[in-house]
Image (cartoon, rainbow, N blue to C red):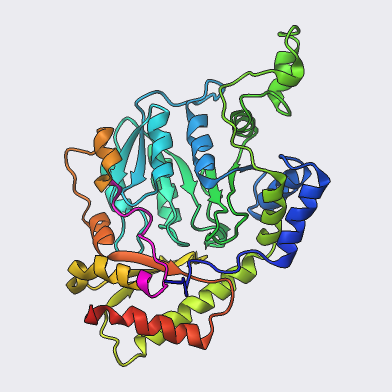
């Protein structure tokens, strides 16, 4: 079946494509002036000093967590320190914690907002708890004021995984700018896209320089480490001096040029997605077949969302029909996805790596897995024809 309603259509404008081609013709394809320009523009928008582009949002998460245990960090974490993470999470929000020798502690979520439950979070804090991986789901967030108060009380560091919520604000402050680190994704169906790509932001120079070395092989190049080690290791070619562990998580300048072009249009995209969401929900609720088959995500007070998709929670009466229903939507060309990966504690990798807690009690995360899914929100105004098509097929659940 041809996809009639994708997660995102027509992602790239002619200008985006022209900018990408322009970089290709310039022969400076790898990380260069466009990357630096995008980083500076991004940091300024979030009212922060430091932003570093990566090749994906997953890579941004890896950098954030890897920096916590890095020997160059004055307040570095120790192996076995605990990081709180919502049970409804993405694979590469979780695995950097494990890969760096830290211990993930799962927290249930709010059923109304799908975001981390602060009540459950407080119950999970122990003497070993050092950080919170706060994942902002599908364009909204938890109560950041309360989370900051908890973090301050228990001296917890906050990493904001904002990969699904670029442009959302809490009390007019952008998500991703509250914690010590904020991570973002520019994957194809996200708020902006350059195909693949990501960004990490931080607040101090020490973290910024550590992130720079980790992003690029452990190189000292263009960091404060360059001058520091140049005199001590004079026999080493300064152009290729490796002072830290590292990865290759660098973006291309093609991604950066397209990313900046899209980022400048973010507010337009947000407005259209918001309007499309309102129209779809209104059309569903005004239809003669509407019988409260669905619930939609509620917004915490003081949140100005940046909608990624239209998240839907089925009425519990339809729990046994969910799989057939989603297969039906696929068959009529309506793309759909789980809410992140559902309750991640059900994933085989959690069992393989022995991460499942003895008390496996995450009722809201399980309900979201059993009943939740989302469809896309386009960056073009939805047509009446598409609206009717979507409504008619979404309300078929009672007939399946």
Q: Quick check: 386 above or below 46?
A: below
**Residue drawn at point x = 41 percent, y = 23 percent:** 78
Residue bounds of the magenta highlight: 330-344
Q: Where is residue 23 in the image (x, y as percent from the top left)?
A: 77, 49
Question: 32 left or right of 282?
Answer: right
Q: How many discs appear?
A: 0
Depth check, front residue: 313 or 23: 23
In this picture, residue 55 sits left or right of residue 389? right
- Locate residue 68, reporting x and y percent: 49, 30
- Please check the rendered image and state whether residue 275 is part of the magenta-colored stretch, yes or no: no
Give percent across and percent down for residue 71. Answer: 53, 20
Q: Is residue 254 above or below residue 111?
A: above
Q: Is residue 297 visible?
A: no
Residue 357 vs residue 124, the one in the foreground: 357
User: Where's the C terminus, which quadrant?
Assistant: bottom left
Q: In this view, does 290 lie above or below 18?
A: below
- Residue under the image location 46 percent in, 84 percent down: 387
Task: Write down the quadrant of residue 351 in the picture.
Answer: top left
Residue farthest toward the right in the current orientation of the protein: 26
Q: In the visual, does 126 lie left or right of 158?
A: left
**Residue 224's spot in the image, x, y percent?**
70, 25
Q: Which of 53 and 105 is in front in this view?
A: 53
The outermost residue toward the front is 1
Residue at left offset 23%, top offset 73%: 315
| 398 lies above or below 167 | below
Does the image show residue 42?
yes
Quadrant of res 104 = top left
Picture quarter with the N terminus: bottom left
Residue 343 in magenta? yes
> Which quadrant holds residue 222?
top right
């Amino acid at each position: 079946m041809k996809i009639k309603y994708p997660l995102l259509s027509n992602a790239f404008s002619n200008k985006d494509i022209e900018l990408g081609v322009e970089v290709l013709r310039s022969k400076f394809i790898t990380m260069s002036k466009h990357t630096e320009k995008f980083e500076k523009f991004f940091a300024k928008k979030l009212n922060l000093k430091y932003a570093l582009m990566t090749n994906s949002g997953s890579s941004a998460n890896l950098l954030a967590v890897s920096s916590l245990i890095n020997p160059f960090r004055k307040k570095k974490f120790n192996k076995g320190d605990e990081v709180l993470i919502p049970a409804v999470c993405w694979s590469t929000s979780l695995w950097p914690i494990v890969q760096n020798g830290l211990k993930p502690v799962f927290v249930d979520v709010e059923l109304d907002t799908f975001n981390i439950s602060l009540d459950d979070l407080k119950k999970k804090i122990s003497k070993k708890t050092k950080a919170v991986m706060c994942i902002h789901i599908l364009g909204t967030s938890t109560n950041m004021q309360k989370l900051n108060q908890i973090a301050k009380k228990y001296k917890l560091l906050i990493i904001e995984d904002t990969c699904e919520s670029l442009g959302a604000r809490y009390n007019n402050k952008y998500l991703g700018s509250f914690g010590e680190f904020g991570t973002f994704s520019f994957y194809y169906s996200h708020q902006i896209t350059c195909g693949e790509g990501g960004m990490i932001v931080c607040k101090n120079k020490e973290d910024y320089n550590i992130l720079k070395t980790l992003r690029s092989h452990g190189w000292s190049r263009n960091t404060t480490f360059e001058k520091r080690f140049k005199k001590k290791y004079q026999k080493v070619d300064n152009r290729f001096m490796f002072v830290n562990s590292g990865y290759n998580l660098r973006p291309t300048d093609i991604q950066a040029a397209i990313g900046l072009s899209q980022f400048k249009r973010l507010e337009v995209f947000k407005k259209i997605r918001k309007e499309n969401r309102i129209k779809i929900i209104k059309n569903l609720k005004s239809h003669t077949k509407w019988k409260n088959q669905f619930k939609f995500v509620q917004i915490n007070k003081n949140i100005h969302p940046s909608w990624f998709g239209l998240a839907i929670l089925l009425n519990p009466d339809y729990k046994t029909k969910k799989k057939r229903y989603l297969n039906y939507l696929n068959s009529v060309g309506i793309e759909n996805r789980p809410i992140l990966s559902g309750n991640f504690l059900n994933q085989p990798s959690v069992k393989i790596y022995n991460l499942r807690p003895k008390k496996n009690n995450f009722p809201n995360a399980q309900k979201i897995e059993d009943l939740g899914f989302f469809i896309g929100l386009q960056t073009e105004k939805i047509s009446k024809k598409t609206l009717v098509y979507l409504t008619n097929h979404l309300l078929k659940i009672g007939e399946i």
